[in-house]
């Protein structure tokens, strides 16, 4: 096998195994020693790169990595006495430590450790952005460079952000364990909020790199799947978020053209919607309905469900409007307010929606003027043009500028022809 | 921004018995109205009051129902944010209770620690 194949395999294994090894080691050492866990894991992959390049790829590469990680951990304990003494003290409280430290890389312990690490990292004591960064690094095995690219910033900023976050986890003495039954719901909320942010970071990412965007979304779904896979955390609200992410992800290939420009919902080629993901979304939506809770994820998943149906249903917009009404009562956001008003226009007509739109008080938001432009179209085209022109002045991204210009072009053409 | 409570009152109607369809359309009217205020980011919180309730009077006298000896019943309330009473009154416009013979009382809220 040539060098290129080795490198590809290592990259691949890095993606799948890095997070497993690091989770197990973090769990073993405690979050206080998260950097030692990182060092040992990094060293393991470094050794793989060096050795495999010279001697070829071992028969079972994953087992090789685990064995090396175990040995490196043992070496570390022998070498660094202060560290081992400190850790051994911690250990003796929890488990019977015979003579040597045992690194348990069984599937069960890997899964348990990863689930517990999700809760340790998605912790409200550190800022949301740092949670996402740390999740990408530790839970998803992303490189610092990739994280910087995703946030459109530089490596230094990310390094600093992650350092501060780890420092915080250390000083607050966060333990790696599942929350108690009593705290579970509130802790789950933070975890889900972070996973949703991670998903949105991919879905609406500022980066032009399409594969990276998709990967962020898939990682958020993968982490959510961890929660579903465990009985304790498989709650209706977790299913609701999964349904929501499945519906959004189903349009991934339809919403971007060959050169990376976004395609608006009503101009998408529906045959490109991923049926398998829509079916999965339907399954999780049903699961989410067990119980009485109606969270914002339930409502957003419900809206996404209606947007994922290809058949026209007369009750579609009515259902969407009701869901937005409820969503706004749970939590106000400008985008929900605008979408609600659009749904209102579909149900009650543009005239009524215009009256409500004028009350929204979102005069700095270009989507607001685009909405007014849309509502005034065919009612008062001069006003529609006026609003789209304000929107054009406020919009920043190429995609937004492009779509607004298209509407303006259409309106001005018609004016010209009349 | 100040906070105001809107209290929805209507007269007790013993023969009130809406059909499920009427109930559904009634709920939608309320939700559309609430949604309109919520879309302006002006709802602090909203609650509907159930018919379950009792009234406590002096000397430990408890009567059944929240509406004993009153002609009006409070069906629910919402706390909204508004610059002043006039703006709060504007928000109250279109409240579904007005088309069902009820009325909205709008009151300014004074914080206890303020």
Image (spheres, rainbow, N blue to C red):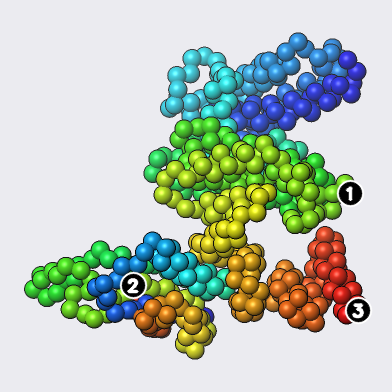
Residue receiving disc 2: B75
Q: Position of residue A143 (x, y in %)?
A: 76, 38
Q: Which quadrant of the structure image shows residue A357?
A: bottom right
Is A3 rendered above or below residue A30?
A: above
Which numbered tag is attached to residue B22? Answer: none
Q: Residue at x 77, y 43 (%)?
A: A272
Residue receiving disc 3: A416
Q: Are marks 1 and 3 on the same chain?
A: yes
Chain letter of disc 1 in the image = A
Of residues B106 and A198, the one drawn nearer to the viewer in this rendering:
B106
Residue receiving disc 1: A259
Q: Residue furthest bottom?
A: B86
Q: CA distance from mark 1 to mark 3?
A: 32 Å
Circles 1 and 3: CB distance less than 8 Å? Answer: no
Chain letter of disc 2 in the image = B
Q: Quadrant of the N terminus of chain A?
A: top right
Q: Position of residue A163 (x, y in %)?
A: 67, 45
Q: Residue at x 80, y 23 (%)?
A: A9
Asked if residue A84 can be seen in this view, the reply is no
Q: Residue at x 10, y 70 (%)?
A: B60
Is A239 rendered above or below residue A375?
A: above
Disc 1 packing (10 Å; few <14; some 14–19; many ≥20): few
Disc 3 packing (10 Å; few <14; some 14–19; many ≥20): few
Asked if residue A332 can be seen in this view, the reply is yes
Left/right placement of residue B80 relative to residue A221 reads: left
Q: Which quadrant of the structure image shows residue A118?
A: top right
Q: Position of residue A232 (x, y in %)?
A: 45, 35
Circles 3 and 2: CB distance less than 8 Å? Answer: no
Q: CA distance from mark 3 to mark 2?
A: 55 Å
Q: Secondary structure at mark 1?
A: loop
């Amino acid at each position: 096998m040539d060098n290129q194949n080795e490198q590809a395999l290592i990259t691949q294994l890095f993606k799948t195994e890095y997070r497993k090894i690091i989770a197990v080691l973090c769990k073993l050492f405690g979050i206080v020693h998260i950097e030692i866990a990182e060092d040992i894991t990094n060293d393991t992959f470094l050794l793989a790169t060096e050795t495999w390049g010279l001697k070829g790829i071992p028969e079972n590469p994953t087992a090789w990595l685990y064995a090396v990680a175990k040995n490196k951990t043992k070496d570390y304990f022998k070498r660094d006495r202060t560290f081992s003494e400190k850790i051994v003290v911690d250990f003796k409280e929890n488990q019977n430590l015979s003579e040597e430290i045992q690194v348990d890389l069984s599937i069960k312990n890997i899964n348990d450790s990863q689930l517990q690490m999700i809760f340790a990292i998605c912790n409200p004591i550190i800022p949301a952005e740092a949670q996402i960064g740390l999740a990408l690094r530790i839970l998803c095995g992303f490189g610092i460079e990739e994280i910087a690219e995703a946030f459109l910033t530089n490596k230094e900023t990310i390094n600093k952000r992650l350092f501060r976050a780890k420092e915080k986890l250390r000083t607050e003495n966060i333990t790696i364990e599942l929350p108690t039954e009593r705290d579970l719901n509130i802790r789950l909320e933070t975890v889900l909020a972070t996973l949703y942010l991670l998903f949105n970071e991919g879905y609406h990412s500022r980066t032009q790199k399409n594969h990276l965007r998709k990967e962020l979304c898939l990682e958020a779904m993968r982490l959510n799947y961890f929660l579903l896979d465990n009985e304790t955390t498989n709650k209706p609200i977790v299913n609701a978020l999964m349904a929501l992410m499945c519906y959004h992800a189903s349009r991934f290939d339809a919403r971007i053209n060959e050169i990376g420009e976004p395609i608006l919902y009503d101009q998408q080629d529906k045959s490109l919607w991923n049926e398998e993901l829509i079916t999965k979304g339907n399954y999780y939506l049903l699961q989410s309905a067990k119980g009485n809770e109606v969270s914002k994820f339930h409502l957003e998943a419900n809206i996404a469900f209606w947007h994922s149906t290809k058949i026209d249903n007369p009750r579609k917009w009515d259902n969407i409007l009701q869901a937005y009404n409820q969503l706004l009562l749970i939590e106000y956001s400008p985008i929900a307010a605008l979408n609600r008003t659009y749904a209102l226009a579909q149900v009650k007509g543009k005239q009524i929606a215009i009256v409500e739109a004028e009350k929204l008080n979102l005069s700095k938001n270009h989507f607001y003027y685009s909405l007014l432009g849309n509502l005034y179209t065919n009612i008062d085209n001069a006003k529609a043009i006026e609003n789209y022109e304000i929107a054009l002045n406020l919009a920043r991204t190429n995609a937004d500028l492009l779509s607004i210009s298209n509407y303006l072009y259409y309106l001005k053409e018609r004016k010209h022809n009349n | 921004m100040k906070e105001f409570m809107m209290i929805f009152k209507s007269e007790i109607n013993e023969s009130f018995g809406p059909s499920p369809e009427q109930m559904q359309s009634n709920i939608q009217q309320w939700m559309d109205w609430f949604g309109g205020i919520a879309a302006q980011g002006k709802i602090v919180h909203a609650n509907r009051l159930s018919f379950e309730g009792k009234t406590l009077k002096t000397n430990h006298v408890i009567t059944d129902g929240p509406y004993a000896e009153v002609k009006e019943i409070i069906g629910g309330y919402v706390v909204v944010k508004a610059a002043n009473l006039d703006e709060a009154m504007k928000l109250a416009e279109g409240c579904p209770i007005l088309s069902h013979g009820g009325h909205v009382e709008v009151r300014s809220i004074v914080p206890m620690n303020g």
